[in-house]
Image (tube, rainbow, N blue to C red):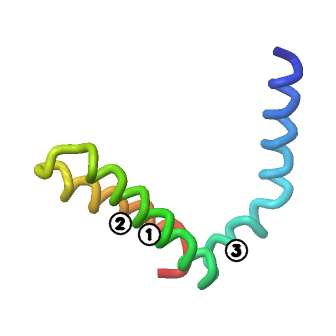
Amino acid sequence: MGGVDDIINKGKHLLDENRDKIEEALKTDKAEEVSDKILDGAADAIKKVVPTEHHAKVDEVRENVDKHIGNA
């Protein structure tokens, strides 16, 4: 498991080193456009498999996630 732990630690290190750049990139118009497409697709896919009474909750979760990505 040492190899997996090393990869995880390297990923954490890269994240820490580039946190400002990553956060800035997540607040761009392009990130908003891409994230909206992904979130819409995911929400639509989920709605196909969950009962109708849960669709409002799916939309709520989608909106909450969207608030944290892009510049909306």
Q: Nearer the viewer, mark 3 or mark 2?
A: 2
Sequence order check, earlier mark of 3 and 1: 3
Name the mark on residue 50: none
Q: Report which quarter residue 43 is drawn in.
A: bottom left
Q: Amino acid at mark 1?
A: Lys
Q: x, y percentage for residue 39?
A: 44, 63
Q: Amino acid at mark 2?
A: Glu
Sequence order check, earlier mark of 3 and 2: 3
Q: Residue at x 18, y 49 (%)?
A: 54
Front residue of 32 and 21? 32
Q: Is residue 58 left or right of residue 36?
A: left
Q: Which residue lies under the disc numbered 2?
A: 63
Above/below status of 24 relative to 65: below
Q: Which residue lies under the disc numbered 3?
A: 24
Q: x, y percentage for residue 63?
A: 35, 66
The secondary structure type at the circle numbered 2 is: helix
Above/below status of 1 relative to 12: above
The secondary structure type at the circle numbered 1 is: loop
Q: Report which quarter residue 21 is drawn in.
A: bottom right
Q: Residue at x 81, y 24 (%)?
A: 4
The secondary structure type at the circle numbered 3 is: helix
Q: Amino acid at mark 3?
A: Glu
Q: Are marks 3 and 2 in contact (CB under 8 Å)?
A: no
Name the mark on residue 67: 1
Q: Is residue 53 left or right of residue 30?
A: left
Q: x, y percentage for residue 6?
A: 87, 28
Q: Residue at x 68, y 67 (%)?
A: 23
Q: Residue at x 60, y 84 (%)?
A: 29
Question: Distance from label 2 to label 1 (Cα)?
Answer: 6 Å
Q: Are marks 2 and 1 in contact (CB under 8 Å)?
A: yes
Q: How many marks?
A: 3
